[in-house]
Every structure is written in structure tokens, then in C-alpha cells.
Amino acid sequence: RYSLFYKHLKNIEENEGGLDKFSESYKTFGVNQFVDGGIYCKEWAPGAAAVFLAGDFNGWDPFSHPYKKMEYGKWELFIPPGKDGYPPVPHGSKLKVVIRAQNGELLYRISPWARYVVRDEDKVNYDWVHWSPPQSYIHKHPSPKRLKSLRIYESHVGIASPEGKVASYKNFTYNVLPRIKDLGYNCVQLMAIMEHAYYASFGYQVTSFFAASSRYGTPDDLKEMIDVAHSMGISVLLDVVHSHASKNSEDGLNKFDGTDSCFFHSGPKGNHELWDSRLFDYANWEVLRFLLSNLRMWIEDYRFDGFRFDGVTSMLYHHHGIGTGFSGDYNEYFGLHVDEDALCYLMLANHMINSLHPECITIAEDVSGMPALCRPVAEGGGGFDYRLAMAIPDKWIQIIKELKDEDWNMGNIVHTLTNRRYKEKYIAYAESHDQALVGDKTLAFRLMDAEMYTNMSVLSPLTSVIDRGIQLHKMIRLITHALGGESYLNFMGNEFGHPEWLDFPRKGNNESYHYARRQFNLTEDHLLRYRFLNTFDRDMNKLEERFGWLASPPAFVSEKHESNKVIAFERAGLIFIFNFHPYQSYVDYRVVIWHSSLIVVFKYKLLLDSDAAEYGGHQRLDHNTEYFSEEYPHNYRPNSLMV
């Protein structure tokens, strides 16, 4: 793998002047305006017989501005500035690339490199709009330094409002970012930013890779949003989709030059049978240029601080993970079933990002557990910084769905939370957007279900269902946060147990926005119990910010007691103790402390208590109590304390 990566890197250096220049192609491809007002246009359309540019600027004459054919399927066009020095293609005017296919058919296409596309309410397809404002947004604040403890707030701009509508970048900037900051998250991961024609695809059917979605506002609105996040010390990651692309041809990449290949594999190899989408040909030189340039544009133009790569499992294997289970056997990760070209692209992408922008972070969404995916490229690894611990939310769902409380297996919980490769960083999460979608259930909804509609008011009796749900919701999130990885992720709204599910407007729900929103107002009503969960989530993050357990070595687990239902571990100098027993409390319970010798007696105090009143608990612990270590052997360690 490293040999293939090095071969690509060497070819890029010899033929393109290096990876820096190669990935800078976003500045020359598409339609770009020069300082003197001239317009330079460049496209890659290897299957085209001829290429033209048409639009408002030439009265939509499809033949008046032909491109010149260059080597390797490239086409170029230069339009000089007007006599008055003004650009011939005004800012805000509509454009199309006109492709004459080999069969003579004229195809009106959006440039794959288009920076801004919009859809009028009365139209089905998107239109390409030339975006070249006289004064673009100027960033005022530097990007935050690379974070050691990453606390990620997974977000979708369009649903980030209690109102039943598509919310805006401006709304997110001024109403949601302050909330994220207050909750103690230091990183926002933005979904559905790359333009996608179908809103209900959650942004995973991308049509225009270089365009920020116009349904939320303008490119400058997004730049301002990121700049304001940076002013708060919040890093911003883009959920980037390079694993596949929408099948749309009128306003997407599909059949751009009239062939079924171009950016994709031709034939069945170029189609994902479950996602109904097109698959990139990662061995193609121009596809590598397109995807690498795409990453660089998002970093340099918008100031994103890194990426969460979606669908990495699909990229890594020719079978795309369809109908395949992964047990951890190394034969599953090495062989002819692995798509080495796709893996090499990921290595190139991470190498480029790390070389040009070392402060940026990359995350892999891989369910297979590919070894060394999060080790440096120089070691033959994939080069990612983090991978998602995707087994953890599945485990919590399985436990809650299938087991009675008294049957919860402490050893199995600990195993799932700690089962990760040494020195590969994992992002732990109890639930993400996947669990919030219609057809699935959030943890809160699984725990409390229909009673969330009637018994979340403090004026109503605290039923056993609501009591159990609130307490387990806090405990599950804290143990996942503290034991499950080197970073933590939460999907917006789930921190306070957002009721119901997430469903975008579509024919199946009469185009309703009722479930495509986040009811943040629920946490502001002091008569509702949602504020307890919200406050606990905030204080949990603030405690991590203070002690940094995510950046600390893995925890030392001292106890996983099956009959007592107790889990205890130590990390970052803190002792975490969880009692999952459904009805049994303990007095004078002895737990291990890690220190092997007691030259001094250590004093411990209670820092976070899920049973505290402000978190909807029963106040059964005295927060003024001090706990002292003693030289008393317990669980094969020489020292312990009583709680």
C-alpha cells in the first residue's frame, strides 16, 4: 500500500510540480475571474466532442464561446474583459457548460467545479450561478490551535431551529454557536454542507462538491459562521462525502461528458446498489485532482479545520461492506477484496492535509476496523487522526432493547467501551444522527418512549419510567465519554434527550418540517425535565475540559462486578464509579485507587454526581464528604478507599 502511495506521490511531483500545485487546481478549473476582469474557464470532459460556455452573459447562445481542446481530455476558454474593464460574466449571472456528446446530442451541465448553485422554488433542478462578489467575506479570527481533547457537536444547519423550516447559516451563527460554547463543546461537525439536490438525503447525495449549500444562505454567510465559531475557540469540521456521488446528471456529476464514466467507474462497478449512487474511479488521475482540490478548497477558502470522511468502509472494499461482517480477522483487511486505489487516495488526502495544513483533523467513518487506518502514512497507515467507535452506540441499543436491567453485563459493557487498537484514536459516542433518524430511536426515546409526551413536566409525578430514563441517559453518556475513546461526539439535541425522531420533508410525510427541527426551547422551560439532562451534559464537558481525560492514556478499570452491577475505573487522576443496579445502593463500598505506594494519604472529593438535584437526581449523596485513601488491598491493588 505504501509503495502504491509513494508511486502516486512521485508521479505527481514529476508531472504536476508536486502535491501542493496539483491540489491547487480548484483555482484554475471551472470558471475563474482574473484580477484584470478576464474570465478563465477549464473543464475535464474526456468523452466530449466539443465544449461551450453559455449563460446570461451571451444570451444563452450555446455556440458563441467554444472551449479549446487540450491534452488528456481537458478543455480551456479565455474570455477577455470588456472594453470598460468589467468582467464579461457578471457576479450572480447564470451559466451552463454545454457538452456536445459523441452522438451529437447537446447536454447542458453544471460545472463540477461550480462554487454556487441555487434552485428556484418553481424548478426541480439547480442552476449554476457565477459567484464572484466585488468583496468576499474576510476572516477576522485565526483558527483555533489543534485540540488535544476533542468534544464534537455534530450539527445540521437546516434543522437547527425550533421552527418548521430550513434554518440558515445566520441562525446557526447567532443562535446555535453560543449554545454549543455554553455546553462545553469545542468542535462543531457540520453535515449537509456540500450541495445536495435532495434535502432528505441528509447531505449524503452530493451534486455539487465545491458549492456550499445555498438553501441555508450564501458562501459568505458560511464563512462568517466559521469565523464566529473560531472567535469562540470552536473548531469546525466538514462532513465530506468522497465515497460516492448523486446519480443526478442535470445538476450533478453523473454523465457530465455524455459517458457513464468520466469521474466514475463505468458499468456495474460504478454503481452502489444500496445507495443508488455513483462510485468514483480513484485510479484516475483527474479524479484524484478533483477530490484533493476539493478538500483543499474547503480548508483554504472557508477555513474548515478538518474533515469527517463519510462512508470509508464502502471505499475500502470492492464489496463496499454490503452483506459482509467483520470479526477482526486480518484476512478480512488484506487481499484482493480491498480497493487499494481508494485506500491510496485516502492516504494521499491525509498526507496532503497533514503536509499543507498540519493543524487540521481528519476522522474516518469506518465500521470494519481496518488496521492502521489511524496511524501515520509514513508507517504505512491510512493517516487519519481519529476513527468513529461505531460499535458503542450499537451496543447500547442492543442492551436497552433486549435485556432487563438486572441482566446487564458489566464485563460486556467495559469490553465494548475499551475494545480498540492501542495508539489508534477513537471517537466515542452513545448516539449520533444515525440513531435519531426516522425508523430508529434515540436513547431517550428508547428509554422513556410515549411517556415523554406526558410526564416530562416537573408538575407531573416522577414515574418509574421517566426516572429510570433520565438516570440511565446521564450514566450512559458519562461512561461513554470517560471510557470509550480519545474524543467524544454528540448529535445536536440528543444532549437533552430530544423527543421523537428526525425526518426530513418528503412525499411520505406530506413534505412536513415538523420532525426536521431541533426544539432547543425545551431546555429553557424550567417546568420541563429536559433542562436536567442539558445541565448534566454541560457539566460533564466542563469537567473534561478541566481534567482532560480524553487526552489521557486509556483508563485503568479496577472493577466490573456482575452481581453488584458496579463499574469502577481511573483516568486522568479521577475515579469514576457507576452503579447500574436497578434497585440496590451501597454503603461503605470499597474501590481501588491506582497509586501503588502510599507515601502520602490522598484526599478525594465528589466532582460530578448524576444523582444531584440540578440533574434531576434524588440527592442521596453528601457533597461535603471527603474520602481518604488507605493502605488496604483490594482487587489485587495495595490501596483503596471507601465510598
Image (spheres, helix red, strand yellow):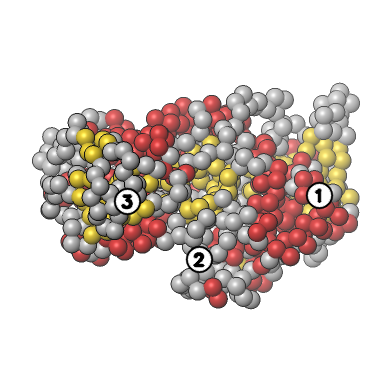
Q: Please report the residue visible at 22 percent of the width from the left and 38 percent of the height from the top.
A: 627
Distance, label 3 to label 1, CA atoms, is 49 Å
Whether tag 3 and tag 1 are in contact, CB under 8 A, the answer is no
Residue 18: mark: 1
Task: Return the x and y of residue 397 as percentages of the image width and height.
Answer: 32, 59
Q: Is residue 231 above or below residue 126?
A: above
Distance, label 2 to label 1, CA atoms, is 33 Å
Q: Amino acid at mark 2?
A: Ser
Residue 191: mark: none
Q: Secondary structure at mark 1?
A: loop
Q: Amino acid at mark 1?
A: Gly
Q: Earlier in the sequence, mark 2 or mark 1?
A: 1
Q: Residues within 10 Å of mark 1 (few under 14, many from 20)?
A: some
Q: Earlier in the sequence, mark 3 or mark 2?
A: 2
Task: Return the x and y of residue 501 as percentages of the image width and height.
Answer: 34, 50
Q: Residue furthest left?
A: 461
Distance, label 3 to label 2, CA atoms, is 28 Å
Q: Earlier in the sequence, mark 3 or mark 1?
A: 1
Near-viewer residue (510 or 628): 628
In-image side of 42 versus 462 (left or right): right
